[in-house]
Amino acid sequence: MIKHQSPGLKNWFNKFVKKKIIVTGGLGFIGSNLIDLLLKKNYNIINLDKVSYSSNFYNTREHKKNKRYKFIKCDLNNKNKLNKVIFAFKPSAIFNLAAETHVDRSIDGPDNFIKSNILGVYNLLEVFKKYSKKNPKAKLIHISTDEVYGDILRGRSDENYPYKPSSPYAASKASSDHLVFSYVRTYKIPAIITNCSNNYGPKQHPEKLIPKLIYSILKNKKLPIYGKGLNSREWIYVEDHCQALIKVFQKGKVGNFYNIGSNINKTNIQITKALINIAKKNIRIGKNVKIQFVKDRPGHDVRYALNSKKIISKLKWKPKIDLIKGLNLTFKWYLSNLQYYSSIKMKEATKRIGLKK
């Protein structure tokens, strides 16, 4: 069986016959929110996470005593352990959310992005290729990003739009998408690829824009905005994204790509001003809470925008949380979970990176 696990784990694997799912990267932002939703829908979950800087046990603390949830520390690059877990648990689906995701970090050091996002996915595909031969109804849902399309200055990119990644992060995700699709075509593995727009919501690491802004507001600090704040992103509340992923698993067609977006684009400066207004309705903000424009990110894409008509029409999914409601929910979650910030090395998390050339 699996080394370093309790003797009772094999019995735990065998206890559940149906509705078994593996989520990789389940201690992260989207992964932990997906686990919350899957458990509510009565699935039995194995959370595989290598426990990197952005992994946080706070995100899954409420599931520690849940008999339908198990955490196993596992790096996708540990192929032997990955193989043992998958064949022992026999999942009906694997949601792959294990990835390095911060563009700035990829600029400073692409190495980890190549290892996790490309080589890690390769290992997962090799194991899943063998597993799916014995379990042909199982599905691999590979979660990717809208950043693979690069700048979309006009209109919206659909699933047939050519990839043109700008950052090492986006290039690593584009590589993994191509790799997954090649295994679908060549080895006939039952996999689906999704590309989602910018997520926000509870449990997001504060290296990302919205939780960093909320932290700065709560700590009476200046609000750093890259360039002039005119970069436009399509914002989707994380629960809406997770609902879409479950819909893709349940009804998606193997070998297909599905864009997942909200059709709501806002610039970074618009998001910042909206958060300031929300904060004023909930707390008394300090005098240091002011927008501070800082040096822009190298190669910063101007605009991302997805065409999500396919998933809306084919799978009957659509987002339910509008932007202002979602930002309110997000702000109130962080306000009610201040200990979340204490579980992170905030000085390191909010330090400016991504300026290396």
Image: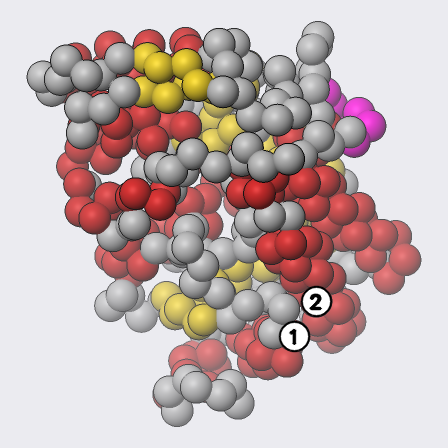
Give the number of the disc on residue 97: none
> Which residue matches tag 1?
79
Q: In the rendered structure, which segment of residues is drawn in magenta?
A: 157-163
Residue 161 is covered by the magenta coloring: yes
* Residue type at the position of mark 1: Lys
Identified at 26% across, 27% down, the residue is: 216
Q: Disc 1 on helix, strand or loop?
A: helix
Residue 331, quarter of the rendered image: top left
Residue 253, quarter of the rendered image: top right
Near-viewer residue (55 or 59): 55
Counting from the top left corner in percent of width and height, residue 125 is at: 73, 63
Q: Residues at badges 1 and 2 in contact (C-beta under 8 Å)?
A: yes
Within-10-Å neighbours for mark 1: few <14, some 14–19, many 20+ = some
Q: Is residue 273 above or below residue 67?
A: above
* Residue type at the position of mark 2: Asn
Q: Disc 2 on helix, strand or loop?
A: helix
Q: Is residue 107 above or below residue 71?
A: above
Q: Left or right of 289: which side holds 200?
A: right
> Which residue matches tag 2?
123
